[in-house]
């Protein structure tokens, strides 16, 4: 489970996120939706412990990110929108190193003599990376780079997945494959994903959170948000709610 309590993040005099609270329940997909600069990535990075709240608290599986940073990172897999890789590494070399790091940190999935090789084989098959294992990362297409980003996030079998625009730049077939992987992962994991693609969020997410100018403006199922805002679609609901906020100001 992920929980934010009155989360605020400031950079000098600029408030990126202001007093945001929400819960991402286990075995559910929660969508975080907002325009560029709304605070989505700021929140995702705080959950992963890449920075800490200015005010408020972030919890992962009941543990404070600030107080239990190491334990929490062992249980999180993070997929960024534009992953940065060591470009001169071969794909298999990179995955081996990811597994080594997670094994040294004590990930439970690596207990046993054959555990590492078995887990790597599982991840390679899941993301269909067999044909590119001996290629350099610099030679990979956008689709394969995204698959590799997912593979490194899954390599230690985390209980929580944080996905930043996971379908960005993918073709329709790759989008469908990624969607199926996320749905399958929901059976055992807590998933929080940010997206600009409203139809995707409406289709795949169990719960939606709207952000606007660093503040939460809606929280609930797609159906409930549409009903409360008098909208026929999630996209229309977002437009109506953000327009209402602008009028209030």
Image (cartoon, helix red, strand yellow):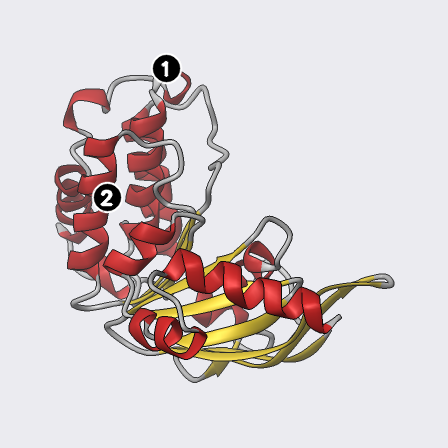
95 or 200, which is in the foreground? 200
Helix, strand or loop at label 1? It is helix
**How far from the left and from the top, in percent, is residue 169?**
39, 31
Q: Which residue is drawn at the image coordinates 39% and 47% (left, top)?
A: 197
Helix, strand or loop at label 2? It is helix
Crowding at mark 1 (Cα within 10 Å: few <14, some 14-19, many 20+) = some
Q: Tell me where residue 17 sits by quadrant.
A: bottom right
Q: Tell me where residue 208 sits by quadrant.
A: bottom left
Of mark 2 and mark 1, the one earlier in the sequence is 1
79 or 239, which is in the foreground? 239
Q: Which residue is drawn at the image coordinates 15% and 43% (left, top)?
A: 126
Is 180 displayed left or right of 25 in the figure? left
Is 62 displayed left or right of 56 in the figure? left
- Residue 63 vs 39, above or below: the answer is below
Q: Which label belongs to residue 178?
A: 2
Q: Which residue is drawn at the image coordinates 25% and 67% (left, top)?
A: 189
- Residue 66 vs 77, above or below: the answer is below
**Quadrant placement of the C terminus:** bottom right
Q: Which label belongs to residue 90?
A: none
Q: Which label belongs to residue 139?
A: 1
């Amino acid at each position: 489970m992920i929980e934010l309590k009155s989360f605020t993040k400031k950079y000098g005099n600029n408030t990126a996120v202001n007093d945001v609270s929400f819960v991402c329940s286990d075995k559910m997909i929660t969508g975080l939706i907002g325009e560029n600069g709304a605070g989505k990535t700021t929140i995702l990075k705080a959950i992963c412990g890449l920075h800490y709240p200015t005010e408020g608290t972030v919890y992962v599986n009941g543990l404070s990110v600030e107080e239990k940073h190491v334990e929490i990172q062992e249980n999180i897999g993070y997929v960024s929108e534009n992953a940065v890789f060591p470009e001169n590494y071969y794909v298999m070399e990179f995955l081996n190193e990811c597994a080594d790091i997670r094994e040294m940190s004590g990930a439970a999935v690596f207990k046993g003599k054959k555990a590492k090789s078995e887990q790597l084989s599982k991840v390679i098959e899941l993301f269909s990376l067999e044909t590119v294992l001996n290629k350099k990362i610099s030679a990979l297409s956008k689709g394969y780079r995204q698959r590799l980003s997912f593979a490194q996030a899954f390599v230690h079998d985390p209980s929580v997945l944080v996905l930043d625009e996971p379908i960005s730049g993918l073709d329709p077939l790759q989008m469908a494959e990624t969607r199926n992987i996320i749905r399958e992962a929901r059976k055992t994991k807590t998933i929080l994903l940010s997206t600009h693609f409203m139809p995707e969020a409406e289709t795949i997410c169990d719960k939606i959170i709207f952000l606007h100018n660093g503040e939460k403006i809606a929280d609930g199922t797609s159906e409930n948000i549409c009903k409360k805002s008098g909208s026929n679609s999630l996209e229309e609901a977002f437009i109506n709610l953000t327009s209402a906020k602008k009028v209030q100001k």
